[in-house]
Image (cartoon, grey):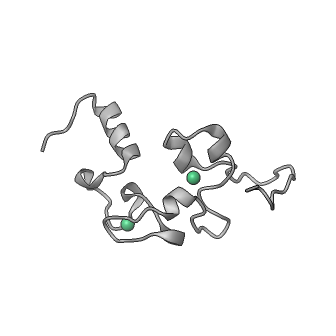
Amino acid sequence: MPETTQRRKKNKKPLPTECVFCKNNGEEEAYYRKHLLKDADGRVSCPILRAYTCPICGACGDIAHTVKYCPKSTKNPETLTTVNAFKLLRNSMGKRRVK
Ligand SMILES: [Zn+2]
Ligand SMILES: [Zn+2]
């Protein structure tokens, strides 16, 4: 049983109730609603993102992020390597980018 410490209080705060990272990745609702992307302290709680290591700065775990959100890479389309970013790129461009 994975759910041990779930509290059932009605939310008063406008905090996110789902993991937007997994949501954007196309995970099932039942999955991304079980956890948040970040906790109240700003640390990454998503197990998938935590396991991801930023290829640009090497961040992972509590401070993990995708290259899209990497503080060291503000504008660098060549470094969009996650599946999600790739998908977005193709959708918005309509065609593949050739270097
Ligand atoms: Zn997640
Ligand atoms: Zn980074």
Residue 86 appears in which quarter of the rendering? Answer: top left
**In the rendered view, does 21 fall on the left or right side of 96?**
right
Task: Decide: is 82 above or below 94.
Answer: below
Instruction: Please give the count of numbered marks on the rendered protein.
Output: 0
The residue positioned 14% from the left and 40% from the top of the image is 98
- Residue farthest left in this picture: 99
Q: Position of residue 90 (x, y in %)?
A: 30, 34
Residue 82 percent location from the top left of the image = 36, 50
Q: Which residue occupies the foreground of this view, 32 or 11?
A: 32
Q: Quadrant of residue 83?
A: top left
Q: Position of residue 11 (x, y in %)?
A: 81, 51
* Image quarter in which the C terminus is found: top left
Across and down, in percent, residue 42 comes to 60, 67
Q: Residue at x 50, y 59 (%)?
A: 49
Taking the spot 87% from the left edge, 53% from the top edge, the residue there is 9
Dividing the picture into quarters, in which one does residue 28 lie?
Answer: top right
Q: Residue furthest top?
A: 94
Q: Quadrant of the N terminus?
A: bottom right
Residue in the foreground of this view, choosing between 64 and 30 = 30
Q: Who's the residue at 86% across and 49% down the image? A: 10
Residue positioned most to the front: 1
